Image (tube, rainbow, N blue to C red):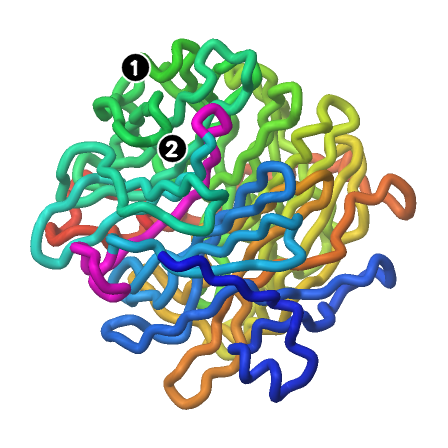
Amino acid sequence: MTRILSDLRSCTSLLASLACLAFCTVPAVHAQDAPAITLTQISSDPFTVGPGQHATEVEPHVLANGTTEVSAFQTGRIAPGGATAIGWATSTDGGSTWSHGFLPGLTVGNGGGPYSAASDPAVAYDAKHGVWMIASLPISNTSTTVAVVVSRSTDSGFTWDNPVNVGPKVDSSDKNWIVCDSYSASPFYGNCYVEWDNPDTGDGILMSTSSDGGLTWGPATGTANHAFGIGGQPLVQPNGTVVVPIETNGISAFSSTNGGSTWSAPVTVSNIQSHIDDGGIRSGPLPSAAVDGAGTVYVVWEDCRFRAKCSTNDLVYSTSADGIHWSAVARIPIDPTTSTIDHFIPGIGIDPTTSGTTAHIAVHYYFYPKSNCTQSTCRLYVGYISSHNAGTTWNLPVKLAGPMQLTWLPNSQNGLMVGDYIATAFSNGVPHGVFAVAAAKSGTTFSETMYTADGLTVPEAGPQLSSAGDKPLHNLSDPIEREQPEKGIAPPSKKAKRRSK
C-alpha cells in the first residue's frame, strides 16, 4: 500500500477541514483547566460499498513503541458482523502527526481480499524481528475461514503485507488478541502469542505462538482444563511469563511459563457484578489489561458492586505480580458512589518505564452522566482518568468528547456500537488513547470516526481522589449479556451461550 503522508494538524478553517476530510484538531471539552487538551481525528471511512454502514469506524486498539504509535480499527461497520475493512493509523512522532490507510489482501470491500468482512483488530510489536502486527478475524458469507489472520509491517507501520493465517479453518471464531515478547532478557524474546475463542464449542479458549516474526504460527492449543472464555488480552512479563486476563464465568486469568508450549487452567480474579448499560448500546464487562515495567498485571472492567442496588457501573480493577494471586477488587474513583454516572468500555494503559508504587496508569472510557436513560435520552461521552502512584490515588477525570446521541451510532447484532474495547498507550511517557467519536448523521450517512487526545498527562500534583474506604455493598448483578456470534456462516452452537464479538 502506498504510504499516505498527511499532517492532520494542517486544517485551519472549516473549509480546509472539509477539504481534508475534517482531519483537524479541535478543542476538547474537559473538566480541568490545564493542560490544554485537543482532539485529533486520525482516520475516517471513505467507503461506499454495501452492506457497510458508512461512514463509521469502531473498536480501536493502539500500541506504542518509543515515539511510534500504531492503531487499528473496524472501518465501515456491517450490522450483522465485522466491517468493510480494517483501518490503520500510524504516528512516528509521538502522536503529533498521523498517516492512515487500510489493510490489503483482507476484504472484498477494500479490493483484492478474499473475505466478506473483518473484525476485532489488535496491534502488537515484535522488537526482536522489528515487525508490527495487526491480528484480525476474517469473515466469509459463503465458506469457512481460518480462525485468525495477522497482517505484518516491517517499515514502522506504513505498509502492510497480505495477511498470514493463524489457526485451522472454522465456522466461527471470536475476540482475538495479540502480544509479543519484546524483553531482550526474556528466554522467549521474539515469541508472539495470539488468543481467540471458538463460539461453536461454547467459547473454547485457544492460543497460538510464532517465533519468526509472525510468518508462521504453531498449532491452536487450549488451556490445561480446556476452559471456556471470551475477551482474553495476553500480556508478557519481563521474565517471559504470559498472563491472559479473560472473562469466563467471572474475571479470570491463565498463563504460560514455557513460551506458549502449554497453558495453565484459569484462576479466578473476581466474580462479575454488572449493570446492563441502558439505551441499547453494545457493552459489557469484558476485561482491559496492561502490565507495568516490572511485570505487575492490571485488569479493569465495569462493575456495580460499589453502587446501591447495582444501579450503575464503576470501573474496577485487580492486580497481580504472578498472574495467580490477585488483589481485592478496587474502585477507580471517577465520581462518588452516589452519582448517577454509568461507566463502561474501559481501555487501560501503563507507562512501561514506571512500576511498583510509582506506576503511571491512564484509562480512557465511555460514560453516561445519567444511567437511567433510553435510546433517545442517553448521552454518551468519552472520559479519561490517571494515577501517578499505581492507583493509590487518582487525578481528577477529564471529559474528552460528547455529548453523543445513540442514534448517531451504527447498529450491530449486539447493539449500537462504538466498540467492545478501546485502548490507551504511552509514548515516551505521554498517554494517548484512540476512541470512536460520533456526530449527527447527514440523512442516512453516519459520521463516526477515530480520534486521539493530545495534551493528556499523568499529573503528580493537584487534587487527588481515593476509593480507599469504599466497600462492596451487595452481591447483586444484572444478567451478564450473552450476545450472538457474528462470524461465519453457521448458526450459533447450542453450547455457544457466551458473549461474542
Q: Is residue 269 above or below residue 138?
A: above
Q: Position of residue 478 (x, y in %)?
A: 46, 49
**Is residue 404 visible in this depiction of the protein?**
yes
Residue found at x 43% / y 78%: 446
Residue found at x 22% / y 41%: 199
Horizontal relation, residue 24 to residue 47: left or right? right
Mark 2, mark 1: which one is toward the viewer?
1
Does the magenta portion include 123?
yes
Q: Position of residue 253 (x, y in %)?
A: 45, 24
Amino acid at circle 1: Ala
Give residue 141's quadrant in the image. Answer: bottom left
| Residue identifier under label 1 | 224
Tell which of 143 and 215 is nearer to you. Answer: 215
Residue found at x 15% / y 43%: 494
Does the magenta portion include 182?
no
What secondary structure is found at the residue carrying circle 2? loop
Label 1 Cα crowd, 10 Å radius (few <14 / some 14-19 / many 20+)? few
Looking at the figure, which quarter contains the N terminus?
Answer: bottom left
Residue found at x 60% / y 81%: 17
Q: Position of residue 226 (x, y in %)?
A: 26, 21
| Residue identifier under label 2 | 248
Check if mark 2's residue and mark 1's residue have beta carbons within 8 Å: no
Residue numbers of the magenta segment: 107-129
Horizontal relation, residue 433 to residue 160: left or right? right
Amino acid at circle 2: Thr
